[in-house]
Image (cartoon, rainbow, N blue to C red):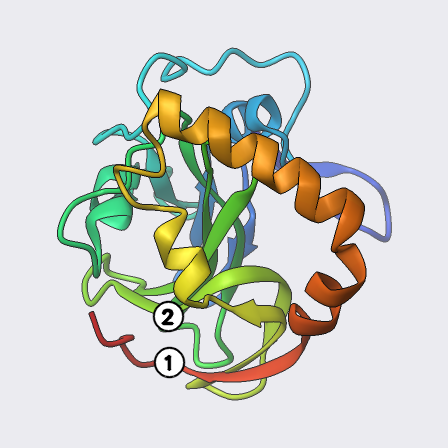
Amino acid sequence: GSHIVDTDTNDIIQTNSFPIHCLDEVTGNAFYMNYARVHRVGGYGYVGLEDIKALDDIPSDCGIFVGNIKTSQKKILVSISDIANCNEESAVITGYPHYITHLCLNPAKDRIAFLHRYRLSDGGENTRLMTVDVTGSDLRCIAKGFLSHFTWLSNDKIFIWGQKSSGVSNLRESKLYNNKVFSLGIKLAKFFFRNFLSKSVNAINKKTFLHITDSNMPN
């Protein structure tokens, strides 16, 4: 849950049955996620909570939620299953849980940006920058690769740190690459690259600040 506190008196003026990640003060809609799941898989979550969807890597009833501080009503806005399947022929299955993090409303408060993440079989992680309408419609994947902290520059422009995916990154998501036998060989090769070719690899994989427009990536 969450408390709304008077910062002048430190008095609690309202208690909600849901957490608040970002809030539209006009409509009273508060957006949030499963913080137990985020903590369990290594993100910014809360300690001591049980992830009731721990056995489901791509749940259809867990994702981004919306609760209203004026009416106390709450519901799921968009599921991890919908998110994982967005802009993909099918959700990428690697044997690790998909999760979301970093919810952020745009200045107009009509779209939410967030990061969709999942681990790869070689120990790496892929991140997709996504947006969705505050009604839960018009879900978009607008960038993919190594992506981290971001902010909205305007209602349709996002400023983010990272690097967009390459052909090698796309290969890492393939079914062959995520085959257990094949992935073992990849891990050995990755060890070689890290230890003997790190300088040249780092020269290629330079990260920087990116300007992303809120529109769908091509499939």
Q: Which is closer to the viewer, label 2 or label 1?
A: 1
| Residue 175, x across and y down, in percent | 25, 38
- Residue 79 or residue 108, whichever sits in front: 79
Residue type, mark 1 in image = Asp
Residue under numbered circle 2? 111
Q: Is residue 26 above or below residue 43?
A: below
In the displayed structure image, the side of residue 44 where residue 28 appears, left or right: left
- Residue 84 or residue 19, whichever sits in front: 84
- Residue 99 or residue 45, whichever sits in front: 99
Residue type, mark 2 in image = Arg
Image quadrant occupied by the C terminus: bottom left
Q: Is residue 58 above or below residue 212?
A: above
| Number of callouts | 2
Q: Quadrant of residue 131?
A: bottom left
Q: Secondary structure at mark 2?
A: strand
- At label 2, counting other C-alpha atoms closer than 10 Å, the crowd grade (few under 14, some 14-19, many 20 or more) is many
Residue ID at (31%, 19%): 56
Q: Earlier in the sequence, mark 2 or mark 1?
A: 2
Task: Say the numbered circle drawn on residue 214.
Answer: 1
Q: Secondary structure at mark 1?
A: loop
Residue ID at (43%, 73%): 109
